[in-house]
Image: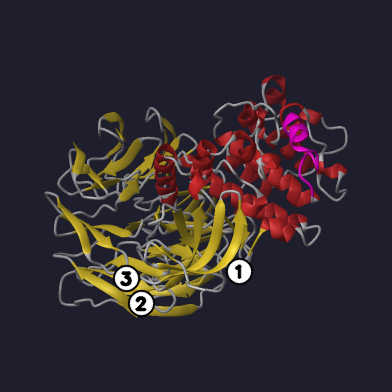
Amino acid sequence: MTQRVIAGRYELERLLGRGGMGEVWAARDSVMERHVAIKLLQQHLGTTEGEELFFREARTAGALSHPGIVTVHDLGRDHDGTLYLVMEEVPGRNLHVVLQGGPLPVADVLMWTAQTADALHAAHTVRILHRDLKPANLMLTPAGSVKILDFGIARYLSSTLTLASRFAGTIAYMPPERLLGRVGDARGDLYSLGCVLYELLTGRTPFGHLDTPAVMYAHVHTPPAPPSSHRLDLPPHLDALLAELLAKDPGDRPVSAAEVRDRLSHPPTSLPPGSPPALRAEPSHRLVGAVTDRLQPQPAGPAMAKPSHQPWTYITGTEVNTSPAVVDATVYIASGSGEVYALDAATGTLRWTQDTNRTFWAPFGEWIVSSLAVADGTVYIGSGDNKVYALDAATGTPRWTHTTGRAVRSSPTVVNGTVYIGSGDNKVYALDAATGTPRWTHTTGRAVRSSPTVIDGTLYIGSNDKKVYALDAATGTPRWTHTTRNWVSAPPTVVDGTVYIGGTDNRVYALDAATGSPRWTHATGRAILSSAAVVDGTVYIGSGDKKVYALDAATGTPRWTHTTGDWVHSSPAVIGGTVYIGSGDKKVYALDAATGTPRWTHTTGGAVHSSPTVIDGTLYIGSNDKKVYALDAATGRGSVS
């Protein structure tokens, strides 16, 4: 039988599955020489309007970068009209298959669902919905982590299928508002997540094996039985959480996927018999009126599972100012001496190190201060030796280098097969991720130390020429520029149509992402080199005035500030109601995201310019004491020297 080749490069090898929308195949990408999964959508689904929607939605989903979301590599239309979507190949079994093996451990179910909620939160933060969440779209990897499949096609399918076929196979997980013909929002995904959690815990969907009309009626009108009525070993708080997730009115559901993640990761302590039911079942944000007067909610702890391994430290050759990337149980980080390290995330054991081609006699020419990016098995990083490197993530072997005109202090961003990065030679580069070949360059007025952010086909970046740029990501053509009072080295953060960025003119800017028009500015006491984290309507950012700020994302009004012992150039990570950040006072801080109250601090031997990465209950960060740290994110506990 002749092997089918899609788009002249994807060689279909074996059929993985077939459904109403089409087929999924394991394939080999002959250009990149890697194995992928490719989804072929039925030709009869294609209309001009539907195809445009498919490409728009899939490109948007392809910009998502989260360990719990399957990476989209490519999409297109084959010569015979077949629409295709190329994704990373993820080993393992989907949760629909896992369910066939019988009852699942409750702890595993809660961990998988919390991971899914965290990934949903990342997507919802950039206004991307899934719309077809179900066990078959959740892949359990051999490492025990869950990845969500099929972002970007559910809306396309809903626009092209008939009413009857659209409900086939997904009706058991569909929110009532969609059945009533309403558009819905992110809370529809939370309802579907509730259906998935119910099934993983009990082995049955919320409304069992009713026929389609009866299930549709039940979604809209009938509360499901508590899951504990089907499985006696379930804790009571899960009944309460599922009652909220499966509420008919979206307004009665949890406010965000982040809240669901937090409540799954940190179940409430048991209340004594006779406690008021409202206090048993309701989360703290719902306590109102007289109840609030009697019981003020306490700050929630870090929303994450306990670390699966002990804290550790790894000693490098020189200062570590870069921020770690944690991918596939490996910590990738670079030191100022020009070395890139790959460390085992569980133990800190060195897997490989790669020395960049530094020039020791050039002032600071050897230093790596930019953080790295890891995508598709490749580590990308800029260096003070005027080069951008692409290294094999498994071995550290160079795949290519690209030489710029000056030192590269910018960190790369990799989107849709393109590496975007700035350089000291006053340029922004777009390089082919596979070869390093330039696709375009854009010249600014001064050195570019800011790192790019790419959202919806636009690249946002700051420059030492006192400007923030919005460039067309495909061509480098300027869309707008905004002039500040001094150079801009901080990387921008783009959330809900707003660009948040700090400058050395001691200001935080909120700019309209479409036009560059200022929405607000907030003055701090010193320069800002930290990138902002924007979570649940709050902007968190550090400043050279020794403070961490929490600002209202809509107005810039301060919600709180926390003073450290020295400058804060580290960028914050906000996970589960906790702000993690480093400071020049040699400390790593965990602050309550709502109040700024410290939860813990961990003292290192040097200034902490590195920004933290928090994965599976462990915080990874570098320090100027020449060490990389893995700390317990809940307590700050480090390894015993």
Left or right placement of residue 124 versus residue 362 in this view: right
Q: Amino acid at mark 1?
A: Gln
- The residue range painted magenta reads 204-217
Cα separation, mark 2 vs mark 1, equals 23 Å
Q: Residues within 10 Å of mark 3 (few under 14, many from 20)?
A: many
State the quadrant of the C terminus: bottom right
Task: Provide the residue designation for mark 2.
Answer: 317
Tell me the residue at 49%/41% (across/down).
Answer: 156
Task: Provide the residue designation for mark 1.
Answer: 310
CB-based contact (under 8 Å), mark 3 and mark 2 = no
Could you tell which of marks 1 and 3 lies nearer the N-terminus? 1
Question: Which disc number belongs to residue 429?
Answer: none
**Nearest to viewer (mark 1 / mark 3):** 3
Decide: is 444 above or below 637: above
Cα separation, mark 3 vs mark 2, equals 22 Å
Q: Is residue 423 magenta?
A: no
Question: Which disc number belongs to residue 390?
Answer: 3
Decide: is 424 above or below 542: below
Residue 298 image offset from top left, x and y in percent: 65, 37
